[in-house]
Image (cartoon, rainbow, N blue to C red):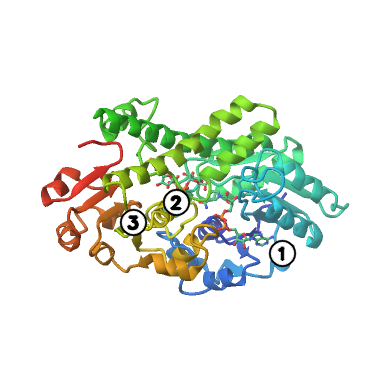
Amino acid sequence: MTAVKSICCIGAGYVGGPTCAVIAYKCHDIKVTIVDVNPARIAAWNSDKLPIYEPGLEDVVLARRGKNLFFSTNVDGAIQEADLIFVSVNTPTKKSGMGAGRAADLAYVESATRRIAQVATSSKIVVEKSTVPCRTAQSMRTILEANSTDKIHFDILSNPEFLAEGTAIDDLLKPDRVLIGALQTPEGIRAQQALADVYGHWVAKESILTTNLWSSELSKLAANAMLAQRISSVNALSAICEATGADVDEVAYACGRDSRLGSKFLKASVGFGGSCFQKDILNLVYLSEQLNLPEVAAYWHQVVIMNEYQKKRFVRNIIKTLFNTITNKKIAVLGFAFKKDTGDTRESAAITLIKDFIQESARVAIYDPKVDRQQIVMDLSEPGVVDTQQQVEKHVQICSSAYEAAKDADAVVLVTEWDEFRDDQLDYAKIYDGMHKPAFLFDGRLLVNAPKLRKMGFKVNVIGKTE
Ligand code: NAD
Ligand code: UGA
């Protein structure tokens, strides 16, 4: 295999867009075309307002767009032109049929693979970038091989993505590691090397790990499961802290100082969100069940169960503290994205919380610096909860500042850890003045200095703390 000259990325989402934009940014000798079936998304990538908010992304895109970085809806043309194709489509949890609620829906991966098989006119390296169950590459290979000829050969690689939203560009520019799995055949190893050479433009050789295909696929699910497990562990401890007077920040710090544990990913919270943790753990649970390993399945499932418990526990605590009823009370929710520095709301804890508040007949005022009204309304409309968008608009007020949301509120609930909600940035005295008294503040992110706010008059309640 000669050096890769042309790359196509199928799927212009949170992963395909930033990942391949960074490849174009670092490899001026490679033409990178990112394609999608969604014309609105491609139009946004080609506009002044990119479809996703991610610090540093705009600079990277603007530096290379129109030079060696292109966004297009011409999927077939880009497939034909490329010698390496990333499949970076969505792999959501299945909503119906076998494995519903657990298994990954691989329909988009299969359809992209079939498209490659159908339209390719030359040999390709096909790279599984989406997060998939272990051995998905086998199905992709079967589809591709059924269409290979003497002249057209397909190699398949697994190259899972480890970026986190909000820090995607940094993560891509300075990855802890890049993982490339391949079949251990001479052709597979050659393809693996060709992709390693692409990353080699900016990633040190020691940070490019090569494994067999199945280890690579499983490592992605394993990494997400272990990260989420740490959060569920610290969240489980937060409940014990609240019942005993221990302080979850102090406990996490004391544990994290053990170099075997490390300090990262031990921040107690209102529960993890995001499009992947829950989906990928459920995927691992399903895989374990399919492999007839029920104890293994139950072990990982507990991470998700604990996350649900944490969200419910937080809501219960709010209702209890507000004298056992929130009917007609105004609750200001600060933050709607699943974490700071992103506009992504997928599986955000805010959605679960707000739906519970609405069911309790509270009035909810929401402010998030990066999530727009339309997204919030869409996320909160759900059959059986708030059926129509008009009903959502009736129950919730979407605000353009934290001050507006907190005006006349009975309680402020901190759900996303945006820097602007810190007590050295937001004027909490002003917030307090505008609220009904007693003015309650529930910190689901251990973001504010509770003693300082108590001095102002707030009744403060923090996850994992009694003081
Ligand atoms: P996304 O929904 O933002 O983007 C996927 C895109 O693929 C969509 O725009 C969709 O229109 C497009 N698409 C679907 N089928 C297509 C087809 N046949 N042809 C062309 N385009 C098609 O999803 P995402 O967040 O980018 O995630 C993609 C994959 O990466 C998932 O498997 C996810 O688990 C994994 N992942 C995501 C993250 C993250 O932070 N979001 C991080 C690591 C891995
Ligand atoms: C996560 C992983 O960190 C990435 O490595 C992975 O590539 C990605 O999933 C994926 O496969 O999609 P992401 O979901 O973007 O990235 O963001 P995280 O920083 O992991 O945060 C996930 C959730 O956990 C957020 O709701 C965050 O607020 C919460 N969290 C995180 C905590 O509650 N406590 C922590 O200590 C860390």
Cα distance in 3D space between marks 1 and 2: 44 Å
At 15% from the left and 47% from the top, the residue drawn is 454
Query: Mark 2 highlights which residue?
Result: 352
Q: Position of residue 221 (x, y in %)?
A: 58, 38
Which is more N-terminal, label 3 or label 2? 3
Seen from the viewer's position, the closer of residues 358 and 216 is: 358
Cα distance in 3D space between marks 2 and 3: 17 Å
What type is the residue that disc 2 sits on? Thr
Cα distance in 3D space between marks 1 and 3: 60 Å
- Residue 435 shows in the view: yes
Q: Which mark is residue 81?
A: 1
The image quarter in which residue 395 lies: bottom left
Quadrant containing the C terminus is top left
Which is more N-terminal, label 3 or label 1? 1
What type is the residue that disc 1 sits on? Glu
Crowd rating for badge 1 (residues with CA inside 10 Å; few <14, some 14–19, many 20+): some
What type is the residue that disc 3 sits on? Thr
At 65% from the left and 39% from the top, the residue drawn is 181
Q: Secondary structure at mark 1?
A: helix
Seen from the viewer's position, the closer of residues 107 and 374 is: 374
- Quadrant for ligand 1 reads bottom right
Q: Is residue 282 left or right of residue 360?
A: right
Which is more N-terminal, label 2 or label 1? 1
Q: Position of residue 440 (x, y in %)?
A: 23, 51
Seen from the viewer's position, the closer of residues 412 and 140 is: 412
Q: Is 374 situated above or below 292?
A: below
Crowd rating for badge 2 (residues with CA inside 10 Å; few <14, some 14–19, many 20+): some
Query: Mark 3 highlights which residue?
Result: 327
Q: Is 386 situated above or below 109?
A: below
Q: Secondary structure at mark 2?
A: helix
At 18% from the left and 59% from the top, the residue drawn is 427
